[in-house]
Amino acid sequence: MKLEKIVKITGKIELKTGLHIGAGNDSIHIGGVDNAVIKDPITKKPYIPGSSIKGKIRTLLEWATGRAGDSNPFATTKDDDPIARIFGNGSNSGKYKVYKGGPTRASFSDCQLSEENNKKLEEIGYTEIKTE
């Protein structure tokens, strides 16, 4: 297998509602705070991890192809599975067949705030705390 070319796709993500990355705690007490917002350790500004974007796109493709109800969508049994070909198959437990079609073909970068939104949010605050 040989790399023949790299295609770079860029875009903007527009949030029209609140966004939460990650899973909440198993128990949230009344008045308690849910899972903290993911922030850049240096700038302390929120961002969307590339792994979260990759997982969301994979999930949307699985929904579009009718695989969303699989008990383990990563456990493909076909070596020509197009989703596994693009995103890979992380199953190394031996319980599921590992996709043998080569390495992951998609790489996703973290999504940082645009300069415009960074300036707006600098004034009012980057995040809000939602309590239960």
Image (cartoon, rainbow, N blue to C red):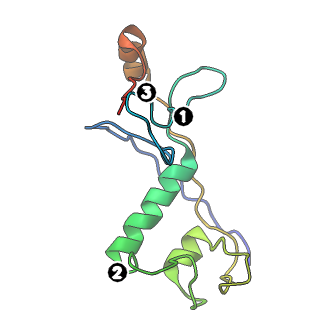
- Regarding mark 3 in the picture, which secondary structure is present there? loop
Drawn side of residue 108 relative to residue 70, left or right: right
Which amino acid, mark 3? Ser
Neighbour tally class for label 2: few under 14, some 14-19, many 20 plus, Cα within 10 Å: few
Residue 30 in picture, x, y percent from top left = 38, 32
Residue 91 in picture, x, y percent from top left = 67, 75
Q: Earlier in the sequence, mark 1 or mark 3?
A: 1
Q: Quadrant of residue 95?
A: bottom right
Assign the C terminus to one quadrant of the image. Answer: top left
- Regarding mark 2 in the picture, which secondary structure is present there? loop
Residue that badge 3 annotates:
114
x 37%, y 39%: residue: 19
Between 5 and 17, the residue placed more toward the observer is 17
Residue that badge 2 annotates:
66
Drawn side of residue 103 relative to residue 76, left or right: right
Question: Looking at the picture, does residue 49 appear above or below residue 84?
Answer: above
Residue contact between numbered discs 1 and 2, judged by CB atoms under 8 Å? no
Residue 13 in picture, x, y percent from top left = 37, 41
Instruction: Measure the alpha-carbon separation of dots 1 and 2.
Output: 31 Å
